[in-house]
Image (cartoon, helix red, strand yellow):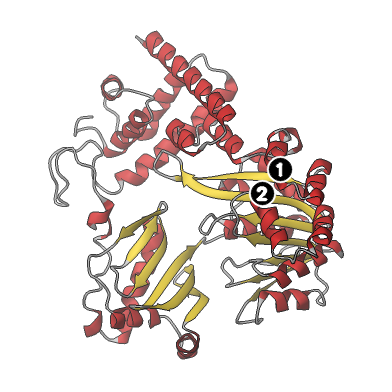
Amino acid sequence: MTPDVPLEIQWFVYALTDAGIVEDDDAQQLWVDLGQPDDVSYFAETVLNQLCESLPEEEQQAWVERIQEYIDYACEQAASGYSPFGGEADEQGYADGQMPDFNNFYFYEHLPKLDDVTELSDEEVREKVVTILTSLRELGCSDLHLSAGSPPFVRRMLQIERIDSYVLTAEDAKRLNFALLTDEQRKNFIEAQDMSLALEVGYDRFRVCMMEQKDGIAGSYRLVPSQVRSLEELGYLPKDAENIRRLLDYHNGLILVTGPIGSGKTTTLASMIDVVNEKRQDHVISVEDPIEILQISKNCQVSQREVGRHTNSYRTALKASLREDPDIIVIGEMHDLETIENAITASETGHLVIGTLHTGNAPNTLNRLLDVFPPSQQPQIRAMTAGSMRGVICQQLIPDGFGGLTLIYEIMLNTMSVANIISEGNSFRLHSTMQTATKQGMCTFDQCVFEKFKLGLISFEAALDYMKDETIIFQLKKEQARIEFAQNAAAKRRR
């Protein structure tokens, strides 16, 4: 597009051309035909009307949602002040036709520099750390890392990006990571050499993990969501969100939320607690390390406990909670035999237990749950789990192909066939059982990706990169061919 086109429309067209929906020349001509509008929404509405011509109502709605995502993306990118199509180099130094490289630090140039930390007072160092932390949400970053022997870096859209070229010394890293700690916290860290805590900085909350390593202190600061979001807002499709809500109607049993680190388990857990808090009148005890998302008691009485601050460990908190008259127990992490054993026992004795594990899929979750026990105990634990398990929700975050991330997941519900598989120890049969039980509310990762593709929430290329099931890959390619045929037919009609 030419430089006289408003930046928001340039980015909108860039997203469409990148997805293969329109050609740049056609978009430029449309902008001229419309009288060269400044409003990206007006331009997008015209594009939408052309795309949806002669399409069924269900497909039209999918395009509406997809186009809105493109508009949001365009507005966000236009705020940076540069064009996706290049042009004259500007004061930031972007060359003609060259997209900016986020590792060249231009994106983070407004953040304070850290090369003068040794010369600053404690208060000035603190102000620098606060400024960087309070900028993370605006920059779309999830984590900040301040580590000795390394330049400061952030995680943005799952990628590591340096925010400065200066390599922090051991003394720099110590001053920066100690800047927001109390005297007691500093003393505890020096004694233990690692620490996990929650920090409030301005209106934001962070989960902070610090450790000693060979070059000095390393600190990671994860930005916690500012509020509890619904399951749909997190990325669950409406029908799947409703199936998860139905799981929360049980008054006993075990529900597991699993996934790798950084996959959003904490926010999903918080959303589930909020569902219970709205629809039930129970006593909820949540044990976390640390407390990240604060829950306000609504219809339920919610008691949040932090490991290291309110209790010594998950297992001692779980034991104690059974004497506190709970209806629902939430365990932030089930990582040792005693915690898992107590959780399974509690789920059998009239409590609904919700916990998390660091596993990648439903079969691995069950294997991990059972393999922590000695072989002599496993038959008994399998039988207990087959009777008490309510469901497993496994999730991941992957690039959506439109410049953002999307949540993908699989859901396993404990039907009679699943219970038999668990009790017999045949977890390898779970995947095929989940594939054929979609009407009962189950889904696999690949099925979830395919459904999101049909709704325009993930690009064809991103979906294809992730999928492993050849049957669903065939369905994906067939659906893409149908979409391309409809687009070509619409283009011919416009001519």
Pick whichever, 26 or 429, lies toward us. 429
Read off the residue under disc 1: 430
Q: What is the residue that sits farthest to the right in this orientation?
A: 349
Residue 358: x %, y % from top left = 59, 59
Residue 211: x %, y % from top left = 44, 77
Pick whichever, 105 or 6, lies toward us. 105
Q: What is the residue that sits farthest to the front in this orientation?
A: 376
Q: Distance from label 2 to label 1 (Cα)?
A: 8 Å
Give the residue type that dot 2 points to.
Ala
Residue 282 in sight: no
Residue 424: x %, y % from top left = 81, 49
Look at the numbered disc 2 and give the secondary structure of its residue: helix
Cβ–Cβ below 8 Å for labels 2 and 1? yes
Position of residue 57 relative to residue 307, above or below, is above
Horizontal relation, residue 10 to residue 73: left or right: left
Residue 177 in sight: yes
Read off the residue under disc 2: 362
Query: What's the mark number on residue 28?
Result: none
Label 1 crowd (10 A; few <14 / some 14-19 / many >=20): some
In what quadrant of the picture does the N terminus appear? top left
Look at the numbered disc 1 and give the secondary structure of its residue: helix
